[in-house]
């Protein structure tokens, strides 16, 4: 039977993860989204570096940098500035969120209950479950499958089955195997994409004019896309730090998480921008054209790494997507409820990938729009943290804890920012359609609106204490 060491922050309502797991690799992680017992804690912050580097060494990251020039009309220099600024902003928030995992010992979407209430948290958790566990899973699975097809000259649907099977298997086993896979994959991905970058940067036309002049509007669109791509990992943050001991350095946890995301995204997106100056916008429908300028050995190594990188990204997507699902509060009285949810989401993502295997870029453009939900969610989370002092563990598993300020503020932030300010390849909102120089202010407006609404509603809804549960003497 799992025991819990004494800790003043373990509230009476806390749901404790059952089963013995520890540092085992070849064992399916038990439980769902419960508190991790203190005697089960393990891991050091340094491993977060490759845990967050490896998932971004993939084709989707390259595509974001490519868009900065070919879709948003920036020069190479402007693209680099937008990539660096947007990614750093999304990585700073990543670090701040990751640092809370060791203290609270729960996934990110359970921590979100403090700001949204137990049932109100269904809004961000539900969105994240679908977007992560199915949406991004499908996009990355397709890019990995197309890379395998180009590498081995096999049917693309067979390649997709191979990729998806590997992803589901790793995610089913859970936390420890996920961390190990990211560590093992890291050297291959680093070397392969590093070699590819040498040939890309050697042939890039740094002074080439973009297909059109994007100006400040194009810069703001690219800034939003790069921020959204990096911040897209934010709803997963403490999922991969919750097993660490409570006394783990917050600064180290934040640094290695944020640095891993920032370095990998900036590097691969700049490679994508460099490729855009070579290709002239032609033939970016899959990994094949991207690696075509490389020597045969480098081309094959990069194709293999694109497939491995897709798996590295998707084991996180399916793991955290299933974690968000079990956070919704469904009563699954199974010791392997998270693993079961991962399998279901993996199958659903496979079906979506099968349907969209010939339209991968359309899917990714759509998901860049969907990422707009993250900014209002972050605003609510951080403003609540600013207004609410002290440890809030008593709220995490209390079904009676309500905070309507959270879901209302997030919904208002989305309702105002997306239809008015969104400016992406698949959807141009009212204001940028009539005033192109506005660019894309969706993330900024969504954050500010949600923050102001939450601050205004906090005194009405947000500071009510949950009902306490008295334990029998």
Image (cartoon, rainbow, N blue to C red):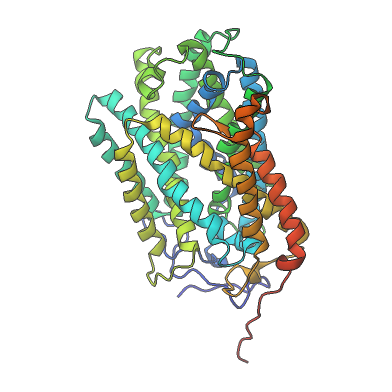
Residue at image x 67%, y 37%?
A: 89
Left or right placement of residue 273 versus residue 404 in this view:
left
- Where does the N terminus fall, quadrant-wise? bottom left
**Closer-to-camera residue (245/346):** 346
Residue at image x 62%, y 39%?
A: 420
Picture quadrant of residue 438: top right
Is residue 332 among the parts visible in the rendering?
Answer: yes
**Residue 353 vertical position relative to residue 153 in the rendered view, above or below:** below
Residue 136 position in % (x across, y down): 44, 41
**Closer-to-camera residue (73/396):** 73
Is residue 28 among the parts visible in the rendering?
Answer: no
Residue 457 position in % (x across, y down): 73, 61
**Closer-to-camera residue (245/342):** 342
**Residue 1 vertical position relative to residue 52 in the rendered view, above or below:** below
**Residue 157 vertical position relative to residue 340 in the rendered view, above or below:** above
Residue at image x 62%, y 62%?
A: 116
Outermost residue to the bottom: 473
**Residue 88 vertical position relative to residue 73 in the rendered view, above or below:** below
Picture quadrant of residue 469: bottom right
């Amino acid at each position: 039977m799992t025991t819990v060491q004494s800790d003043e922050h373990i509230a009476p309502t806390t749901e404790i993860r059952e089963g013995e797991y520890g540092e085992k690799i070849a064992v399916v992680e038990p439980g769902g989204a419960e508190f991790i017992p203190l005697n089960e804690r393990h891991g050091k912050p340094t491993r977060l570096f490759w845990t967050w580097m490896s998932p971004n060494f993939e084709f989707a990251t390259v595509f974001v940098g490519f868009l900065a020039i070919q879709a948003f009309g920036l020069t190479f220099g402007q693209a680099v500035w937008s990539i660096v600024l947007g990614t750093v902003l999304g990585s700073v928030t990543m670090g701040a969120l990751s640092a809370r995992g060791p203290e609270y010992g729960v996934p990110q979407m359970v921590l979100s209950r403090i700001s949204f209430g137990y049932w109100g948290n269904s809004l961000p958790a539900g969105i994240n479950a679908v977007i992560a566990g199915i949406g991004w899973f499908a996009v990355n699975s397709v890019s990995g499958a197309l890379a395998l097809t180009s590498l081995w000259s096999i049917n693309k649907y067979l390649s997709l089955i191979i990729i998806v099977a590997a992803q589901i298997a790793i995610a089913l086993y859970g936390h420890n195997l996920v961390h190990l896979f990211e560590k093992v994959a890291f050297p291959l991905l680093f070397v392969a994409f590093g070699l590819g970058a040498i040939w890309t940067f050697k042939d890039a036309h740094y002074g080439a004019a973009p297909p059109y002049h994007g100006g400040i509007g194009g810069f703001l669109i690219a800034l939003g896309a790069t921020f959204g791509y990096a911040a897209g990992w934010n709803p997963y943050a403490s999922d991969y730090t919750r097993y660490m001991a409570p006394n783990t350095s917050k600064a180290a946890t934040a640094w290695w998480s944020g640095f891993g995301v920032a370095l990998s995204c900036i590097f691969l997106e700049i490679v994508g921008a460099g490729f855009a100056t070579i290709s002239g916008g032609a033939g970016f429908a899959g990994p094949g054209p991207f690696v075509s300028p490389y020597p045969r050995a480098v081309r094959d190594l990069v194709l293999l790494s694109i497939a491995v990188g897709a798996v590295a990204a998707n084991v996180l997507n399916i793991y955290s997507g299933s974690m968000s699902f079990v956070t919704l509060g469904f009563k699954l009285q199974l010791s392997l409820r998270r693993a079961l949810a991962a399998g279901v989401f993996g199958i659903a993502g496979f079906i979506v990938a099968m349907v969209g295997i010939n339209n991968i870029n359309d899917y990714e453009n759509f998901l860049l729009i969907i990422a707009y939900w993250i900014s209002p969610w972050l605003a609510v989370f951080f403003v609540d943290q600013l207004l609410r002092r002290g440890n809030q563990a008593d709220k995490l598993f209390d079904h009676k804890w309500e905070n309507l300020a959270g879901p209302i503020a997030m919904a208002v932030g989305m309702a105002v920012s997306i239809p008015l300010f969104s400016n992406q390849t698949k959807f141009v909102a009212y204001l940028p359609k009539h005033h192109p120089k506005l660019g894309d202010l969706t993330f900024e407006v969504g954050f500010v609106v949600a923050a102001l609404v939450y601050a205004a509603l906090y005194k009405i809804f947000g500071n009510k204490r949950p009902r306490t549960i008295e334990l029998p003497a």
